[in-house]
Image: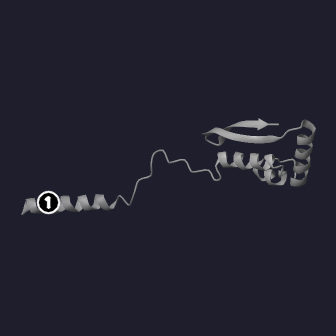
Amino acid sequence: MQSFGNYIAILIVFMALLSCGGGKAEPIIPERKAIEPSPTKVVEEFLKAVKDEKFDKAFQYVYAPYSDKDGYVIQMKNTVRDNQLTILDFRILGTQIFDRTSIVVVELTQK
């Protein structure tokens, strides 16, 4: 009878330990959250807009804290005109993401 009581006690302790788990444990190194939109997509959309000289659309992809949209568009039009910059084509060669910084390598074909 004593051994039966020991088995019951062990079973109760085992069940108590199993119920304490409460679900899946958090990973030690959590997965990096996906950036949306991706840095590659941002550069691609920006270059498409610049190529088509749609600088108002390009403005949404840049950080220009000291310029409003209209000022940015005027500045970009003047820069393109004064420097005779025309993007004929571009090709994204690769992207590297380091924590909160991204590097997108692009090959440009200019006029």
Q: Residue at 78% x, 41% y: name it.
A: 88
Image mark count: 1
Judging depth in this view, the residue of 24 and 52 nearest the camera is 52
Relative side of 9 to 96, left or right: left
- Quadrant containing the N terminus is bottom left
Compared to residue 60, the image places residue 88 above or below, namely above
Residue 95: x, y in percent?
62, 39
Judging depth in this view, the residue of 54 and 110 nearest the camera is 110
Judging depth in this view, the residue of 44 and 66 nearest the camera is 44
Relative side of 5 to 26, left or right: left
Residue of label 1:
7
Task: Give the amino acid at mark 1.
Answer: Tyr
Q: Is disc 1 placed on a helix, strand or loop?
A: helix
Residue 97: x, y in percent?
61, 40
Residue 17: x, y in percent?
29, 58
Q: Can you tell which quarter of the image residue 70 is in?
A: bottom right
Q: Residue at 63% x, 53% y: name it.
A: 36
- Quadrant containing the C terminus is top right
Residue 109: x, y in percent?
76, 36
Which residue is the extreme one toward the left?
1
Compared to residue 61, the image places residue 98 above or below, namely above
Badge 1 local density, few (<14 within 10 Å), some, or many (20+)? few
Q: Residue at 12% x, 62% y: name it.
A: 5
Judging depth in this view, the residue of 23 and 64 nearest the camera is 64
